[in-house]
Image (spheres, rainbow, N blue to C red):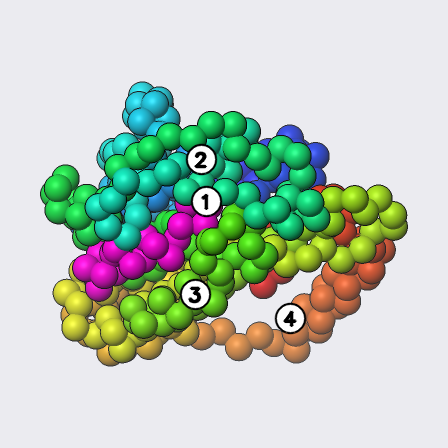
Amino acid sequence: RAFTHRLLRALWNTPDVYSAELPYNLNWARPLTPDAERLLAKAPLVVCDVGARGGAPLELEPFFAAIDYLAFDADEGECARLSKLPHPHATARYFPYFITDRSRPVTFHLFKQPGESSEYLPDTSYVEALGGSDFKVERTVTLEGRSLDEVRQLERLPQPDFLKLDTQGSEASILDGAAATMRELAMVEVEIEFVRGYAGQAMAADVLLRLERLGFEPLYLNRVTERRRQWRGRPGRGQLVFGDLLAGRKLSEAAGWPAERQARYALLLANYGYLGHVRDLLAAAPAARALLPEFASRVETTRIPGRVARAWHRLLEKAIVLVLYLRGGQRGGYDSDRGWPVN
């Protein structure tokens, strides 16, 4: 009920669906079973958020009250501000570190739009074609960078279950300094780039290769498209610029984990709709399944749609196609799969 209320409020109060930032697990938000709530009360989900200005991913909302939230932002003032705000989590801690591949000084560029600030300078070609005049540096500071593994050791932080990386071009560097953290991590949401917005930044292929080597596989990609800045003609197709990649630990890699960690991974997979993954994970991990009998029973119940249900679904798909045809092309500057969560 709370999820539906927030969804309707977002759609009503924003000028377009892109601005609403709909969670891309729109069809999968479900109440937790009692055994899942008991498990999380005993062993909360640990969420590590690097680049925490936007807060924890909305897709994790069903778990918010059972999350130990560890947030990092290079801006010490922003961390101080966030630490004073109310939050929906079991615990929330904010740490003013610039997370990178190793201990080293970092030249950090503060942009006109604070959320676009980066270790990297703007790419000239991107600014001219897509980014616009607001995508520019206002001042530069020097920060002391540290790796995520090092900070976890210094602050004695627990092993995360979920890692979010949104650091405007330095995501690959963070992965390079997080080998120990990634070893028992269940999921990572990371921004990947298809157009070089920042000079010298790693691209999508670089991040995907690192994740594969660390034992992860892609589950979902929220694509973001952008129209060229000078085009003011009829609606057309926006260019794929970046995306939010959801990657999960390969099930074979999670086979040796403790049962509680496997069970929390099963809850995360179900939250994002990967029910087949959940079945295979729990089938290979009886100790984890024993921790979640009600949850496993709900997930493993198979209902084969009847003829009427299948016909209704096909009719609904045709109606969606018609609506998209009437919509035409991309009218605004940005659009994303988050605006059209059809899968």
Check disc 2 and report the residue beneath it. Answer: 109
- Assign a secondary structure to mark 3: helix
Using the image, determine if residue 221 lies above or below residue 59: below
- Eye-nearest disc, 1 or 4: 1
Q: Is residue 165 left or right of residue 234?
A: left
Residue drawn 52% across the image and 48% down it: 198
Residue 189 position within the rendered picture, expressed as x and y whole percent measured from the top left: 41, 55
- Amino acid beneath label 4: Ala
Q: Which residue is mark 3?
A: 206
> Pointer 1: residues within 10 angstroms few (<14), some, or many (20+)?
many
Q: In the depicted view, which residue is nearer to us: 260 or 336? A: 336
Q: Label 4 belongs to which residue?
A: 309
Residues in magenta, as a range: 167-185
Instruction: Find out whether residue 302 is within the magenta segment.
Output: no
Q: Position of residue 10 (x, y in %)?
A: 59, 36
How packed mark 4 is, by other alpha carbons closer than 10 Å (few <14, some 14-19, many 20 or more), is: few
Q: CA distance from mark 3 to mark 1?
A: 16 Å
Quadrant where the C terminus sits is: bottom right
Q: Earlier in the sequence, mark 3 or mark 1?
A: 1
Q: Find the distance from the CA under tag 3 to the CA under tag 2.
A: 23 Å
Q: Earlier in the sequence, mark 1 or mark 4?
A: 1
Vertical placement of residue 203 versus 129, above or below: below
Q: Nearer the viewer, mark 4 or mark 3?
A: 3
Q: Quadrant of residue 257?
A: bottom left
Mark 4, secondary structure of its residue: helix
The residue that disc 1 covers is 120
Q: Quadrant of residue 179?
A: bottom left
